[in-house]
Image: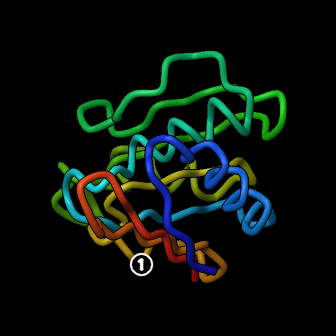
Amino acid sequence: MQMEFTKENIDKAAQQVWNHGKEHSVWAFHAPMGAGKTTFISALCKAVLGVQENISSPTFAIINQYQSPVAGTIYHMDWYRLKSEEEAIQAGVEDAISNSNLCLIEWPEVAPALLPENSLHIYIELTGDDRRVIKIQ
């Protein structure tokens, strides 16, 4: 699946991605810095999954937890500051991934061995000033 989106239609794009990938519990977001990983995750959580809490980047916390009337407990992780798989395990990411809750992971390249085989891989690319292309594998 591949589609283009802007901030104006990000909620619609998030709904389409959810419809395509909701059977997966681990979503790995691959994108360069500033491409909109957290913005897309925020749209997914708020507009599609009904999360009421503020959605923010967990860069310093490593893991944020939200409650959704649609998906239950959601773990939003940012592995950018982690330096190794061992550090990721010590931060508790393995525990979050091993349960059946939805896990949305930014910067999964830090510890790819921790991702289950059936993880949904989402690639966001910048294509213009406010345009992004999202590819799902």
119 and 34: which one is in front? 34
Q: Residue at x 71, y 47 (%)?
A: 101
Looking at the image, residue 125 lies above or below residue 70: below
Bin the neighbour count of mark 1 within 10 Å (Cα to Cα): few under 14, some 14-19, many 20 and up.
Answer: few
What residue sits right under mark 1 in the picture? 113
How many numbered badges does the structure rendering display? 1
Image coordinates of residue 114 in percent, x first then y, are: 46, 70
1 and 97: which one is in front? 1
Image coloring type: rainbow
Image coordinates of residue 111 in percent, x first then y, are: 33, 70
Looking at the image, residue 69 lies above or below residue 85: above
Query: Which corner quadrant of the image does residue 62 belong to?
Result: top left
110 and 38: which one is in front? 38
Q: Residue at x 63, y 58 (%)?
A: 98
Q: Position of 125 compared to 21: left or right?
A: left
Q: Position of 134 compared to 30: left or right?
A: right
Q: Position of 39 compared to 67: left or right?
A: left
Image coordinates of residue 47 in percent, x first then y, are: 67, 33
Amino acid type at mark 1: Ala
7 and 106: which one is in front? 7
Q: Residue at x 57, y 62 (%)?
A: 27
Image coordinates of residue 104 in percent, x first then y, are: 53, 51
Q: Residue at x 56, y 41 (%)?
A: 75
Q: Secondary structure at mark 1?
A: helix
